[in-house]
Amino acid sequence: MTATANTTRATTSNVGAVIRTGVAATVAASVATMAVAAAGHLAGISLELGDAPIPVTGFGVLTAVFSLIGVVIAALLARFARYPRLTFVRTTVVLTALSLVPDVIADAGVATKALLMLTHLVAAAIVIPAVARRLAA
């Protein structure tokens, strides 16, 4: 008698794993965006929009808020979408692109705008792939 291994790939997402991974990615992205902002500031890039300075910690807080919204979207897609990974990636790429619009029209210098946009892309590059890997194809 021979035994065969069942190597069938999971077809459903584990919502708990999606959330745990999403929270960990959120923390990593928040730290990364604060590091990018701090490095940019040390390089002489202004962290002011209009006349209001943005604290470095503000980058981390906003990254956490919007990343966690993405995690909620992922959890809902894991539960209700037919193709959660594809839907999540498409949705978050569009949302990331839309998140750049306020930076483009912000009352700030070109370097500041570029730094703001870079922080969005850094956060997306960390959170989207990490969460997408946990979603069923």
Image: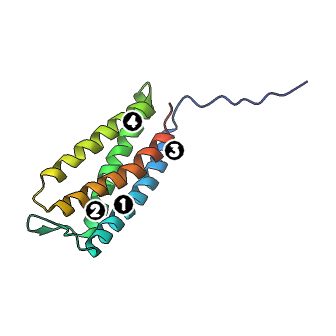
> Which mark is first along the chain, 1 or 4?
1
Dot 2: within a 10 Å radius of its alpha carbon, few (fewer than 14), some, or many (20 or more) residues?
A: many
Residue 59 numbered tag:
2
Q: Secondary structure at mark 2?
A: helix
Looking at the image, do the residues carrying marks 1 and 3 touch, with CB atoms under 8 Å apart? no
Residue that badge 1 annotates: 30
Which of the 4 image quadrants contains residue 29? bottom left
Disc 2/disc 1 C-alpha distance (Å): 7 Å
Q: Residue at x 9, y 59 (%)?
A: 107
The vertical placement of 113 against 127, above or below, is below
Q: Earlier in the sequence, mark 1 or mark 3?
A: 3
Of circles 1 and 3, which is in front?
Answer: 1
SS class, disc 4? helix
- Give the Cα distance between marks 1 and 3: 20 Å
Residue furthest right as drawn:
1
- Contact (Cβ within 8 Å) of mark 2 with mark 1: yes
* Direction from residue 99 to residue 69 in the image, left or right: right
- Spatial CA span between label 2 and label 3: 26 Å
Task: Indicate the position of residue 112 as horizontal and vertical percent values.
Answer: 20, 63
Which one is nearer the viewer's eye here, 68 or 124?
124
**Label 2 or label 1, whichever comes before in sequence order:** 1
Q: Alpha-carbon distance for marks 4 and 1?
A: 20 Å
Which labelled disc corresponds to residue 88? 4
Tell me which amino acid carries mark 2. Answer: Phe
Residue that numbered label 3 is attached to: 17
Above or below, 65 against 81 in this view is below
| Left or right: 97, with 131 as reference point | left
